[in-house]
Image: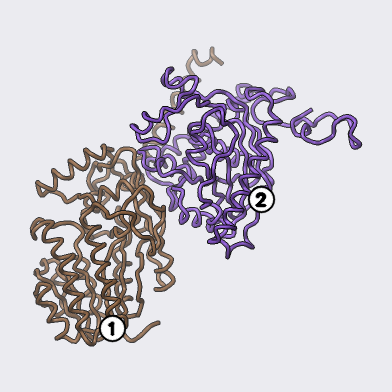
Amino acid sequence: MSQDEFRRDMLPGHADFTLPGPAPAQRVNGRRPIPEKPEAPPVAAEDPDVWDRRVARGLSFIRRRLAGNYRVDDFGFDPELTDTVFHPMLKILYRDWFRTEVFGVEHLPLEGGGLVVGNHSGTIALDALMLTVALRDKHPGNRHLRLLGADLVFRLPLLSELARAAGATVACNPDAERLMTENQLVGVFPEGFKGIGKKFSERYKLQRFGRGGFVSAALRTGTPIVPVAIVGAEEIYPILADLKPLARLLGIPYFPVTPTFPHFGPLGLVPLPSKWLIQFCPPIPTAHLTEFADDPLVVYNLADQVRETIQASLHELLEKRPDPFGP
Amino acid sequence: MVTSPPSVVVVTGVSRFLGARVAARLAADPRIDRVVGLDPHDPPPGLLGLLDGVERIRADARAATEAIAELGAEAVVHMAVTSVPDVRHGGRAAMKEQNVIGTMQVLAAAQGAPRLRKLVVRSSTAAYGASFRDPAVFTEDTEPRAVPRGPFARDILDIEGYVRGFRRRRPEVAATVLRFAPMISSTATTSLTRYFVQPVVPTVVGRDARLQFVHVDDALEVLHRSVTEDHPGTFNVAGSGVLMLSQAVRRSGRIALPLPESALSTGAALLRHLGVEQIGLDQIDLFVHGRVVDTRRLVEEFGFTPRTTTAAFEEFIQAHADGSTLSADRLVAAERAILDGIRKVRAAAETSPAGQDAS
């Protein structure tokens, strides 16, 4: 039985129970449950021109980059660099290391703005990156997710520029509203550092959702909110302890001690290969609530609704995935 | 709202590149009877030719106060705002004197001028300051998060503060504040254009600023329109679109040299003391944080769209192509050479016996 069918309440003895038919051969990311016919290895299909073309394409990419002949939007997003360099690298992690499975992509708007709100975990914000790859990979419109990041990210040299080039911007209402009015899909993690810096014992327990600034930004622009639950990121760097004095000394929100970090040094940066599931939930429309953008009660209730939705689908996903490091 | 153009216009700062051009342009407009240029300094010979139709009064700001009322000025265009200290004219102290005290005096004079209908003040997008928590795009309503460290940006905040005071006291005068992005054209020379034409361009390591430029001709057009038409308010004036600093350096065919911010600051301070180049904290802040503004308000109100940042920069690099090392043509040639090389090696391998063995 595939994981899609597991959730239905059709257990033996149930009135509607029918034996599940053979699942159609379906490609899931990463490992394939049903052995597929191995694809013809690229060597066999070697056409003398394939490599020529690849080299030519690579050279022309390098030439365009060196000549500065590319477009960057107002936020510093560089789609060409993202698609040619960042995503292929992240996809290895997404597909082969985390074996990510994505459900409910149909809940995302095909075009037009959307605010994707997710749970945050995993010590470093790999879940945000995997979410962008999932959207680009699975969404029928291959859309880019524009992340809203903490200002700490934009304070750090290099990281700030990578984040901007990958389409992220500072989490503030003017930027969020501008992106949404430009019909972009915006990704936000309202838990922030409280989410990614929590201990392993608190895994999959949603933290406080800040002041709900993301909700008022969505209300003001009438953008639908799509809650998303991400399972798997909690296990990649399980935080056993947080060295608060050291963190304060370094000016960072927490200093994690994981089974491999800091005592194994850089080796501790290798994430544990947990199994990832990403579930998009049905969108919450906000177009009829535009005038309540400044009403704290409406904003708070809506933020709470989003939070409850994510928490509930986290529990569902965890049932689907009994073994965190399973196939 | 479009009212009749003013008949007497006073332009301050006509000894400088932009001030002289604004004055010349207004003097060429037949609807304006009289253009008076005020400046404590004589214009350099290069600009004298422009100022033929302009009555020049050589006076400092204090003397100018009397002139503005006496002339019966209907519009004052305050262009005497310097962005970098000029060592020949007294350095930073004189710059502050001119920017802050000068503006204060011009506005005081304007306040006392009974026939005044319009005030146009040159400002800069430096008014938004520079902070890591800034939104990516500034609208005219964005407040700076902190007092900026650059001297020019601080002056700009003071200047805009005085204009706010003026608006309160003379609400019937249409006061226009134009926040210009860095200006660029094939002929203008500013510290920023000199920076981009160096063969090796120092940048800040790990930082790549988003930059916007405005073409000088577009800036002049906006200034002209704000004198002849009525556009009260504050407006961002910039070319739409963004160039990353690294991208701009690459487009101009120069080589970027990333330095740590501290090294760049020290180097800039050293050059400043030697009087070679005036790269200040304003520029370094710009290279670290970048600055992008929203120009929708300008486009709607003025009905004029400045050429894009990319187009303005393209024109600039066309005029300064001779210093480039990594030009686009050379890159194309290099790409072709590599591809030809591969093809030749392959052809040689296929014809040689070793190649036949392998296949």
User: Which residue bears the numbered disc 2?
Assistant: A283
Q: Tell me whether circle 2 and circle 1 mark residues in contact (CB < 8 Å).
A: no
Query: Which residue is at a point 19% across and 70% down the rendered structure image?
Result: B103
Q: Position of residue A240 (x, y in %)?
A: 50, 24
Vertical side of A10 occupied by B68: above or below = below
Instruction: For the N terminus of chain B, give its image quadrant.
Output: bottom left
Identify the element where label 1 is drawn.
loop
Identify the element where label 2 is drawn.
loop
Q: Position of residue B202 (x, y in %)?
A: 25, 42
Tell me which chain appears purple: A
- Quadrant of the rendered image containing residue A321: top right
User: Which residue bears the numbered disc 1?
Assistant: B117
Q: Position of residue A303 (x, y in %)?
A: 59, 50
Q: Residues within 10 Å of mark 2 (few under 14, many from 20)?
A: many
Residue B53 visible in image = no
Q: Nearer the viewer, residue A294 or A174?
A: A294
Marks 2 and 1, how far apart at CA? 54 Å
Check if mark 2 and mark 1 are on a common chain: no
Amino acid found under the numbered disc labelled 1 = Arg
Residue B164 visible in image = yes
Vertical side of B65 occupied by A20: above or below = above
Q: Nearer the viewer, residue B205 or A324?
A: A324
Amino acid found under the numbered disc labelled 2 = Pro
Write down the colour of chain B.
brown
Left or right of residue B17, residue A310 in this image: right
- Quadrant of the rendered image containing residue B127: bottom left
Query: Which residue is at a point 32% across and 52% down the rendered structure image?
Result: B130
Q: Residues within 10 Å of mark 1 (few under 14, many from 20)?
A: many
Left or right of residue B117, residue B240 in this image: right
Q: Nearer the viewer, residue B66 or B326?
A: B66
Q: Chain of mark 1?
A: B
